[in-house]
Structures are given as structure tokens and as C-alpha cells.
């Protein structure tokens, strides 16, 4: 049977260089004649994505559970096309996925509190269970200082230092859980130079992109 494409997810905090690195990996694959495409979540082009976009720009307010479910629905609307692409032999590089969904929602705290969770971690995890699972997740770990040196955070909701610190803590927990479930989660030091990070990512991905024999797993199965 021919091999399927690899599903590679790049996760990280805002200003960690995710989008730059995802684009660099795509170019490297194309140079190596590997059939590959880049997708990104949230996909702001769909009707659900437009609601998410308005929320992130603070043009609308939504209940925290409602927005969490919309982010998940935005992945589910692409799930069958992700599977079809992988089966066709094409590799997918995915800029953010369900782990961002879990990290950003589960790190929310109750009003007036610095640490009391607003939403339960397992409640946040459940809507994404059953999505195609990545073969490899690269977590680009950036320090607050390096993020600041890169021009700081932008204008969107969540682009604040206190939020990013809490999100990072949840990402660490998620990484442990992915590994405990047999998944591959690689922490990449994103304070390093763009070129250095590029090489670390290539080292982690280069064997996978030759094609995968194993079936597509389901997330959190
Ligand atoms: P972006 O900057 O990569 O377009 O992501 C937009 C913001 O949305 C970013 O702060 C992370 C957040 N996010 C969630 O809260 N839940 C999700 O499921 C995803 C994919 C992103
Ligand atoms: Mg952003």
C-alpha cells in the first residue's frame, strides 16, 4: 500500500515564530519534491471562522463556552478534508490545532482571580476528541522576553503577557498528556535564531515526510 502523508502540527504562543516556521518548512518540503500543503487554525475564511475572527478582534462578545465550541467546530469542518489529503499522500503542515484550543480556553480564569479556572480542562478537551491526530506536534516555546524583543504582542484578544504565561503552563500539561498517550510532542526552543529553529524542526520532521505507513490516529483516543 502506498504511504500516506504526514500530519505535522506547529503550536506555540503568540510571537513564537509559528507562521514563519510553518512557511519555511513548506518551502523546504517543496524543494525536496515532497507534496505538502499548509493549513492554519482558526481558518477565518469559513462562516464559523468569521465569527471567531470578530471575537478575536473584540468586535463581538461570546460566552467562553460558545467560543470554545466554535474553535472546535472550525476544526471539525475541515476534518474530512484533512483525512482525504493525508490519504492522497500529501503531507499537511498545520499552524495551530486542537492544542491551542485547549490551552487558550483552559487557561482562562474567573473574573478577579489570577488562578481559579473558568472552564474545566477535560470539558475543554472533549469537543476535539476524534479529530485526526497529528503524527508530530512541534511546540515552539518562546520566553516572554524574546516575545517582547520581537515587537511585543498585537492588538487581538489573548495577546497579553499574563494570558500568554497561563497558556504556556497549560501547553506543558498538554504535552505531557500527548506523550503519555503515545503521541509525539517536541518542545522547540523558539528563543533561538530563525535558522536554528528551522534546523531543529527539519531534524524532527525529515523522516516522517517520507510518508507514513501507520493509520491516521484519532485525537485523545
Ligand atoms: P492566530 O494568531 O494564530 O490566528 O490565532 C488567533 C488566536 O486564537 C490566538 O491567540 C490563539 C487563539 N486560539 C484559540 O483560542 N483557540 C483555538 O482553537 C485556536 C486554534 C486559536
Ligand atoms: Mg495572532
Image (spheres, helix red, strand yellow):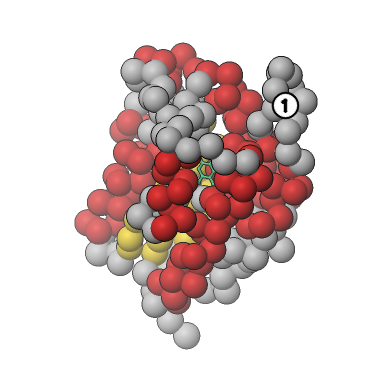
Q: Position of residue 6 (x, y in %)?
A: 45, 63
Q: Position of residue 164 (x, y in %)?
A: 55, 25
Few, some or many residues within 10 Å of mark 1 (<14, 14–19, 20+): few
Q: Residue at x 57, y 45 (%)?
A: 67
Q: Position of residue 154 (x, y in %)?
A: 38, 24
Residue at the bottom extreme, as displayed = 1
- In this rendering, is residue 159 above or below 171? above
Residue under pointer 1: 110
Q: Quadrant of the C terminus?
A: bottom right
- Whether residue 122 appears in this view of the structure is yes
Q: Residue at x 47, y 26 (%)?
A: 159
Residue at the front extreme, as displayed = 60
Q: Position of residue 90 (x, y in %)?
A: 37, 69
- In this rendering, is residue 76 above or below 147? below
Left or right of 53 on screen, residue 165: right
Q: In this orientation, which residue lies closer to the viewer: 54 or 157?
A: 54
Amino acid at each position: 500500500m502506498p504511504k500516506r502523508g504526514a500530519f505535522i502540527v506547529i503550536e506555540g504562543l503568540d510571537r513564537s515564530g509559528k507562521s514563519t516556521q510553518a512557511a519555511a518548512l513548506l518551502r523546504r518540503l517543496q524543494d525536496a519534491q515532497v507534496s505538502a500543503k499548509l493549513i492554519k487554525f482558526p481558518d477565518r475564511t469559513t462562516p464559523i471562522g468569521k465569527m471567531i475572527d470578530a471575537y478575536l478582534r473584540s468586535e463581538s462578545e461570546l460566552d467562553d463556552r460558545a467560543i470554545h465550541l466554535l474553535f472546535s467546530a472550525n476544526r471539525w469542518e475541515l476534518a474530512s478534508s484533512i483525512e482525504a489529503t493525508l490519504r492522497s499522500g500529501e503531507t499537511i503542515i498545520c499552524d495551530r490545532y486542537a492544542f491551542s484550543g485547549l490551552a487558550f480556553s483552559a487557561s482562562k480564569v474567573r473574573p478577579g482571580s489570577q488562578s481559579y479556572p473558568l472552564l474545566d480542562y477535560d470539558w475543554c478537551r472533549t469537543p476535539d476528541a476524534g479529530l485526526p491526530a497529528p503524527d508530530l506536534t512541534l511546540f515552539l516555546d518562546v520566553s516572554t522576553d524574546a516575545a517582547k524583543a520581537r515587537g511585543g504582542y498585537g492588538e487581538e484578544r489573548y495577546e497579553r503577557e499574563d494570558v500568554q504565561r497561563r497558556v504556556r503552563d497549560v501547553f506543558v500539561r498538554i504535552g505531557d498528556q500527548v506523550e503519555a498517550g503515545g503521541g509525539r510532542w517536541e518542545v522547540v526552543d523558539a528563543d533561538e535564531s530563525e535558522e536554528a529553529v528551522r534546523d531543529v524542526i527539519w531534524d524532527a520532521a525529515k523522516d516522517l515526510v517520507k510518508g507514513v505507513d501507520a493509520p491516521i490516529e484519532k485525537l485523545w483516543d
